[in-house]
Image (cartoon, rainbow, N blue to C red):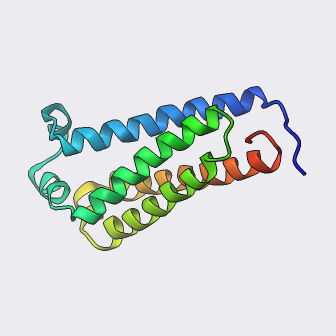
Amino acid sequence: MTTTNKPSIGFWIIAIIALIWNAMGVMTYLMEQYKVEAYRADFNAEQLALIDSAPAWSTALFAIAVFGGLLGCLFLLLRKKMATPLFLISLLCILINTGYSMFGTNQIELFGPVNGIVMPLVVVVIGVFLYLYSKKATAKGILK
């Protein structure tokens, strides 16, 4: 039997920061898909060619990851345990897409160590954290 606990200030801070993080992911996805010139201006021709050549399944995983993460954050803020499966789905999509991008393309060569390795790994770490954090919040009775 679980008890309902009042979330700490830290819970709300994490949930809000996570919502902002995932909203930025959604914005990145939309700018990439709608080919927003201001976004595309930050990349050279080879980088744009790689972005534009992403297979449909990879693009779908990107969409599921960012929208799933955003929904997970909304459920986290609403204190609903539905956040956990949404974060899991998002994490699985992140892992598959990151693996493909890092090992199945020349992303590291084109984007360098920071944008080709470090940033994708930061996304993975945050995805793992949000999934585990939501599981812990459910176990503590914070999420119902």
Could you tell me if residue 135 is visible in this image? yes
For this rendering, which residue is in front, 112 or 122?
Answer: 122
Relative to 141, 58 lies left or right: left
| Image x and y of residue 76, in percent | 63, 38
Residue 9 falls in which quadrant of the image?
Answer: top right
User: What's the residue at 34%, 73% (across, down)?
Assistant: 103
Q: Is residue 3 above or below residue 100?
A: above
Find the residue positioned furthest to the bottom. 104
Q: Is residue 75 above or below residue 132?
A: above
| Image x and y of residue 37, in percent | 12, 34
For this rendering, which residue is in front, 33 or 112?
Answer: 33
User: What's the residue at 85%, 37% (across, down)?
Assistant: 4
Q: Is residue 53 above or below residue 119?
A: below
| Image x and y of residue 36, in percent | 16, 35
| Image x and y of residue 105, in percent | 25, 69
User: What's the residue at 21%, 65% (across, down)?
Assistant: 55
Query: How many discs appear?
Result: 0
Could you tell me if residue 129 is visible in this image? no
Relative to 34, 66 lies left or right: right
Q: Is residue 11 above or below residue 99?
A: above
If the image is split into quadrants, where does the C terminus sit? Answer: top right
Find the residue positioned furthest to the left. 45
User: What's the residue at 43%, 54% (across, down)?
Assistant: 118
